[in-house]
Amino acid sequence: MNTLLNVRTLATCGGAVALALSISAAQAQEWPTQDVRLVVPYAPGGTTDVLSRRVADLLQDELGANVVVENRPGAGSTVATGRLARGGRDIDHTILMASPGHTIGAAIYPDLTYDPVEDFVFIQNLIDIPNVMVVPASSPYNDVLEFIEAAKERNMTFSHSGVGSSIHMSGELFKALTETNMTAVPFAGSGAALPALLGGDVNVSFENMPTVFPHIQTGDLRALAVTSAERSEYLPDVPTLSEIGEHNLDQFVTTAWFGLIAHNSFPEEASAAMQEALEEVMNREEFTSFVTQLGAEKGTLAGDDFKAFVAEEVARWDEVAADAGIRQE
């Protein structure tokens, strides 16, 4: 009787242990096991925030977990990024929507406490938005080469949405490559910069496509070129700066890119789950129509390719910032 009881007890205990181990193994493999935090390193309302909230809504359907958006603005995205780099609580369930500020911030803030490449895992580049070189409708310049010739003779002004923005750095890159006389005129965001451009108070801008596209359509602004590698399907008759080629412009390719990154301790199973879910998200009609509304293109880089791209961007903007004397203490 006792022998039978002991066997049954052992069998029961063994089964319980096996079940516990099985559940533990399943839990270890099934990510996420709690809410996912998507950090936006800017204030609510901008492109980064709007994109993040759209992606969060679609992503939670694919992951089967809540995706909670948290805004942590400050110092050109470096406040939130630095906090992510330090790790801490729930770091294996935290992702961040990175943008050009991630690479430009590393160039203009020399005392960052983190490495913008090695301290992070690069999950997926989601979208790329070209900037557009635009002049007011009243401008006498009808193409880029006319503008450059004039800018070598006299000083031109270009507006931007804030120090270190992709709009600002695109202007500085153009100035450096073409060796023209240009003065940056900062505004508190594109909303404030646009009236000055429309009114002819500044000569040119390298604005994001969504901001200027409606005004190009109405004829209030004239598009001279786009900054992407290929012509935009939304402005097919407008050349790229790189195809113009002269005055070192063959080296000018840049976009406002947006993609998800995480701390470099982010689990491999989490990265795999995120990439699988994001592939589904990016194929959904809701995402495709949103990209179209922005005048953007879907991103194609993920993992190591995305990381290599970011490393190249850091080096490029560091050189531009040094040439322009742009450093924030």
Image (cartoon, grey):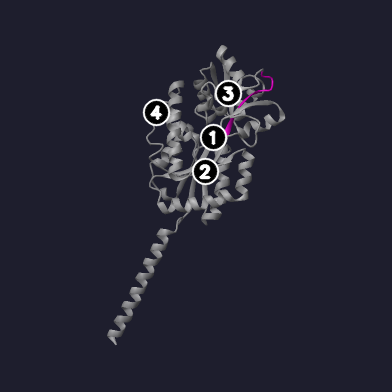
137 is within the stretch colored magenta: yes
Q: Residues in magenta?
A: 130-139
Q: Earlier in the sequence, mark 1 or mark 2?
A: 1
Q: CA distance from mark 2 to mark 4?
A: 30 Å
Binning the other alpha carbons within 10 Å of mark 3 as few (below 14), some (14 to 19) or many (20 upward) gives many
**Label annotation for residue 110:** 4
Q: Earlier in the sequence, mark 3 or mark 1?
A: 3
Q: Quadrant of the C terminus?
A: top left
Q: Is 53 on the left or on the right of 18, as rendered?
A: right
Q: Which residue is drawn at the image coordinates 42% and 29% (left, top)?
A: 109
**Label annotation for residue 159:** 3
Q: Nearer the viewer, residue 168 or 71?
A: 168
Q: Is 105 on the left or on the right of 286, as rendered?
A: left
Q: Nearer the viewer's eye, disc 3 or disc 1?
A: 1
Determine which residue is flagged by label 1: 256
Q: Earlier in the sequence, mark 2 or mark 4?
A: 4
**Label annotation for residue 300:** 2
Amino acid found under the numbered disc labelled 2: Thr
- Is most of the magenta stretch helix, strand or loop? strand
**Which residue of the protein is positioned furthest toward the left in this rendering?**
3
Q: Earlier in the sequence, mark 1 or mark 4?
A: 4
Amino acid found under the numbered disc labelled 3: Ser
Q: CA distance from mark 3 to mark 2?
A: 30 Å
Q: CA distance from mark 4 to mark 3?
A: 24 Å
- The percent coordinates of residue 317 (x first, y second) are 45, 29
- The percent coordinates of residue 290 (x first, y second) are 62, 44
Q: CA distance from mark 1 to mark 2?
A: 14 Å
Amino acid found under the numbered disc labelled 4: Pro
Q: Which residue is drawn at the image coordinates 33% and 77% (left, top)?
A: 11
